[in-house]
Image (spheres, rainbow, N blue to C red):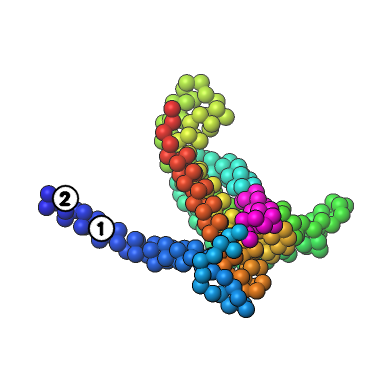
Amino acid sequence: MASERRIDLYACCFRAPLLIWQSLFFVVPLGFMFIMSFWLVKNYRMTPAFAFDNWAKMLFWEVMWRSYGYTLGLAALTTAVASALAFPAAYVLAFRFSDAARRWAIFLLIIPFFTSYLVRVYAWQVVLAGNGVLSAFLGWFGMEPVSVLNSPVATVVGYMTLSFPLVLLLQTISLAAIDKSLIEAAHNLGCGNFRTVFAVLIPAARVGLIVAALFCFILSFGDFVSPYYLGGSSPPTLSIMIVDSTKSGQQWPRAAVIAVIMIMTLISIAFAAVTLAYRRRG
């Protein structure tokens, strides 16, 4: 009994810093933001109160739900595109590259994170503008200039810039950890390459693939930079609506309502994704 108590105390000592950190910088700010969503703004000043005016305004405001659907759709589209494009590259890195070459490839995947995300988004403005690199490239083939800037396509490109290297990195690590004997056994049983991918690789790497998609969705859903600088902020995403609410009459409580809705959405999706990742088959 004394030994068990010592082990519990030992474990609690290691858990304490994480619990304190999460409490101070996540639980407490989230709780304060939730409380602030019930406050009122009078004469451009927040007044502590317990009123449902802000929630009623935002929950029954059609513009907010259109923005919610738009943000959710762009994040889901980016997640699907990034996961689909990253998987073939991750497969090649995991099964066609040597260990040394894979390590160098992973290092190259990390390099984009050395630069500011905002700088990379500004670089895409030069590429996607009407007189930018993309239009010049199309002009070489006699095609008309195309401006992709200030469109949902440009927003998705920005989201991909943010999340694609991370998705590819997580998928590569997940696939590389698969026991190669499983693939050999599938081939011995008559499975072709295509069937082996869906019958062996994807189920074996399911946790890593879902976690990679989840990170992509979280980064895209809450991003402000790409929809503002590449998407033209029209229609606005939820992150842009938060900024607009704080600038319009200092409506911090209404911005808190939007933020709470975003956090609850991400928590729900993350819980569903983790449940799916670790669910037992059959």
Q: Residue 67: x percent and y percent?
A: 67, 55
Residue beneath label 2, please?
A: 4
- Is 46 rendered above or below residue 225? below
Q: Secondary structure at mark 2?
A: helix
The residue carrying pointer 2 sits among few (fewer than 14), some (14 to 19) or many (20 or more) residues within 10 Å by Cα, namely few
Q: Which mark is residue 244?
A: none
Q: Over which residues does the magenta segment extend?
A: 57-75
The residue closer to the viewer here, 274 or 202, is 274
Q: Which residue is mark 1?
A: 12
In three-dimensional space, the C-alpha distance between marks 2 and 1, rounded to whole angstroms, equals: 12 Å
Q: Can you give x and y, in whole percent of width and height, for residue 134 in the image? A: 77, 57
Residue sitting nearer the eye, 17 or 272: 272
| Residue 169 in sight from this viewpoint | no
Where does the C terminus fall, quadrant-wise? top left
Magenta stretch encompasses residue 89: no
Residue at position x 48%, y 34% from top?
203
Give the x, y percent position of residue 279: 43, 36
Above/below status of 75 relative to 94:
below
Mark 1 nearby-residue class (10 Å; few <14, some 14–19, many ≥20): few
Q: Residue at x 20, y 57 (%)?
A: 9
